[in-house]
Amino acid sequence: MTGDLGAAIGVLADRIAAALVHREPGWRLPRRSALARRYNVGVPEIDAAIGELIRRSLIRRLPDGQLYRASQAEYLIPVEGIAGLRTRLDPMGGEITCQARHVSQRDAPRDVAWALGAGAGAAPVRVVRCVWTSGGEPVAISTAYVPDAVAKMVSDDDMRSFADTLHALPGGTAAPGSAYAAAVDMELSPPQPSVARSLRLVPGQSAISVTIRFDDTATRVPVGLSVVVLKPDRFRVVIEAS
């Protein structure tokens, strides 16, 4: 890119950035062709300016190509907060609050019992299910399965926010950091009907499902399983390995 062209792209990026100031984080940008008409330039120039704004962390591009006004860095939520595996959920500026929380104790589903290393006749697990909303709209369902011995070490004071809940429930045996994410799975598929209804998804609509198994650092024994189902148009998920 020549100096003159680079300067022109920089000016175009500044103009788009100035317009974004008046938009809330998470606002979806118009199509590139519409932006090109608005700023009286070609689509290639818009693409270059968008690339510059992505580099500045002012715009986020989702895997499907959609462009959004990026959220501020403080809105990046660590899912498990464990060294060695950095997973971030970016709600693109949405403030997440707990609308409903239900705690029960029952036998674990077969797949959950298998993931926790429990055989037939194992002790029941504590199940904590939360519905999370942003702007009054349900955006996430979190379900944690925790052996009773571990659940007794977690108080309600540890679960004041979306991030705190996902940190605390599989908290290990004692001090913070005594558990680590031994396995993480993420998929995009239609959720169970009950979850789809809770998230107000249309039939067949896919959601992001993140499943994390936590093991005790000392014993390598599973101490919890968290399953989070997210509306795909309200979150950006990034998983990084150090």
Image (cartoon, rainbow, N blue to C red):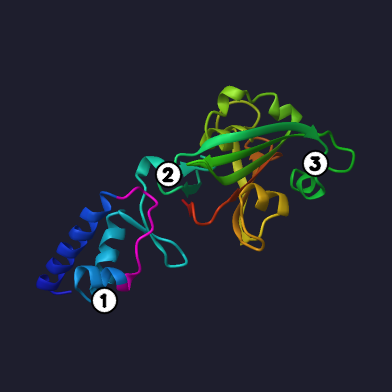
Q: Is residue 61 left or right of residue 206?
A: left
Q: Is residue 57 left or right of residue 199?
A: left
Q: Residue furthest left?
A: 4
How many residues crowd mark 1 within 10 Å: few (<14), some (14–19), many (20+)? Answer: few
Q: Which residue is mark 1?
A: 44
Q: Which residue is mark 3?
A: 108
The secondary structure type at the circle numbered 1 is helix
Q: Which residue is mark 2?
A: 76
Q: Is residue 32 magenta?
A: yes
Give the magenta part as a residue range: 23-33
Q: Residue furthest right?
A: 121
Q: Is residue 82 shown to the viewer in this render?
A: no
The secondary structure type at the circle numbered 3 is loop
Q: Position of residue 54 (x, y in %)?
A: 31, 59
Q: Position of residue 10 (x, y in %)?
A: 17, 63
> In this orientation, which residue lies closer to the viewer: 127 or 213?
127
